[in-house]
Amino acid sequence: MQSPNSALLRDRILDMDASASPNSAKIQKVFGGQDASQEKDLVSRLPDDILVHILSFLPTEDAIKTSILSKRWKYLWVSIPNFCFCDHSVWSRTMSHDLLLEVLASFFSSVESGAPVQNGPCIGKFYRWLEMPVAASRLRSWLSAAVKHNVQELKLFLPKGIEFVLPNSLFTSKSLWHFTLKMDCNLKLPGFICFSSLKYLNLRGVTFQDDQSTQQLFSGFPVLEHLTLFKCNWGNINEITIEIPTLKSLTFFEKVIFEDNFLNCKIVISALNLETLKVRGYLNVELLPCNLLSLDEASVNIEYLIDGQQEHSHRLVKLLCGLPNIKSLKLSNEALECLLFAESCPGHLPTFYNLTTLNASMNGPYVMNDDYTSGALIYVLQKSPNLKSLILSRGFEPEDVDMIMDIVPGCFQHCLKSVLIYNVDGAAQELCSLKYLYENAPVLESLSVICSPQLTKDLEKQEEIRHELEQLRGGSGSCKIVFLPYGASL
């Protein structure tokens, strides 16, 4: 006999909108239960391991519904080899908060009560359901059970303002390979940490308590490949080293600080196999890359310059100095502006011998009021002797062209083959910058111009610009000039 709670849960699941799951009708038709004639109920005659195998092909939410068919079916779904609860599924979105908690509680209580389980449950994924308010003791119990039963992918989004201590067993999980944690409170860590299978880690909003425990955390990822640190609080940290030999990508997104000062925090990044580095924020934290011998791509997006641009400049130069082997570099307009404040900028920057692509349009290719400093851009170009591709959010202003007319970066003369410029409206001053590029880059093969809305409509003006440029090379057509409409994506 079913307990009152089980019966209530059964009725509430059955009362859910049938449209939430297109498989609901099929389930009732295929899995006949006790009400179907025994002659026609061939499925229920199959062995449990075959039934579990069949259930494994259903979405988890549909497999759970089979628990109401009969006493035999009550715990079969617990044995599904890959258990997935995603709150973005149609079924979960249609459930009330209380009902979803009941289903989760039912699952864990079934697992922990010693219910018959085929080969032990493997909780494949738990997604985002922890955004909902739930008692801390219950949450820790569920997490411990998830770890015990080999959770592989876990995303925890905890409500703001709630102090929560993760169970120690989570930090020694042998099965977890993808972990996202969002918690706007102190991250309290155990004495021993080893995520032996973790390859993807995304920490969002956490507050690191001190150097020792944080260093211990980042020393506990022997096979980590992808790390995202999103708006974390580094105010308690003086200096740590992120040294993970297996790391392939690192994204560092700083938290907004509405104060005109910088944190006294240094983060050394040492990763021999790092291929991609993305930095976005304000450089309130000092990032010091070293030994990034495999780095292919980096982007530095400084979103806002607070008072003390000189400190911004020093920190940016230190960051760039740690990227000597970079092949593709993206810089925001503010990053270029930062370099303007660095004393003797060309002397401070390293020479990027491997850099072949420079993108100076990170603030958005269709932002019309980009104010990057052309002088700083030229400085970077001078430090990129082997550059082949250049992407700009706009051309040089007339006053900039006058200033840099006698400064021609070596890459222009020897190896620059492709230039892409956004937001060209055909004004006389922009033609000056196009001529500067066209005249001083004799090996240029492709000049692509993304037109403004006005120039997009003016085909005659496009041809006029094309003709003027081609005449600079005697009309040889050695460089292909392409005009693309506003909004074009490449």
Image: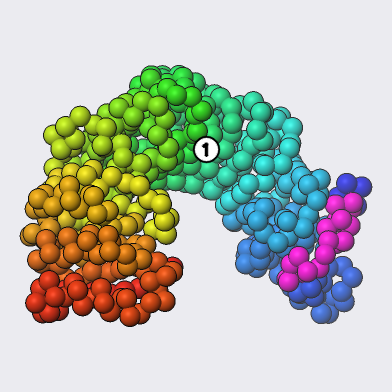
Q: Nearer the viewer, residue 374 or 15?
A: 374
- Residue lying at 83% horizontally and 79% vertically, measured from the top left: 39
- Residue lying at 28% horizontally and 64% vertically, measured from the top left: 428
Residue 183 in view, yes or no: yes
Q: Nearer the viewer, residue 319 or 232?
A: 319
Tell me residue 477's x, y (percent).
14, 79
Please give the range of residues in magenta. Answer: 7-24
Tell me residue 112's x, y (percent).
70, 40
Residue indicated by mark 1? 204
Residue 45 in view, yes or no: no
Q: Main secondary structure of the magenta part?
A: helix
Query: In the rendered image, which quarter is residue 40 located in?
Result: bottom right
Please determine whether, in this image, residue 443 is positioned above or below residue 474.
above
- Residue lying at 89% horizontally and 70% vertically, measured from the top left: 35
Q: Is residue 16 magenta?
A: yes
Category of crowding for the residue at label 1, using alpha-carbon neighbours closer than 10 angstroms: few (below 14), some (14–19), many (at least 20)? many
Tell me residue 30's x, y (percent).
76, 74
Task: State left or right for residue 42 relative to residue 338.
Answer: right
Q: Is residue 312 magenta?
A: no
Please determine whether, in this image, residue 319 is positioned above or below residue 49.
above
Task: State left or right for residue 265 relative to residue 175.
Answer: left
Please determine whether, in this image, residue 148 is positioned above or below residue 266.
below
Q: Nearer the viewer, residue 174 or 160?
A: 160
- Residue lying at 34% horizontally and 56% vertically, measured from the top left: 393
Tell me residue 404's x, y (percent).
16, 49
Amino acid found under the numbered disc labelled 1: Arg
Q: At numbered mark 1, what does the secondary structure look like: helix, strand or loop?
A: strand
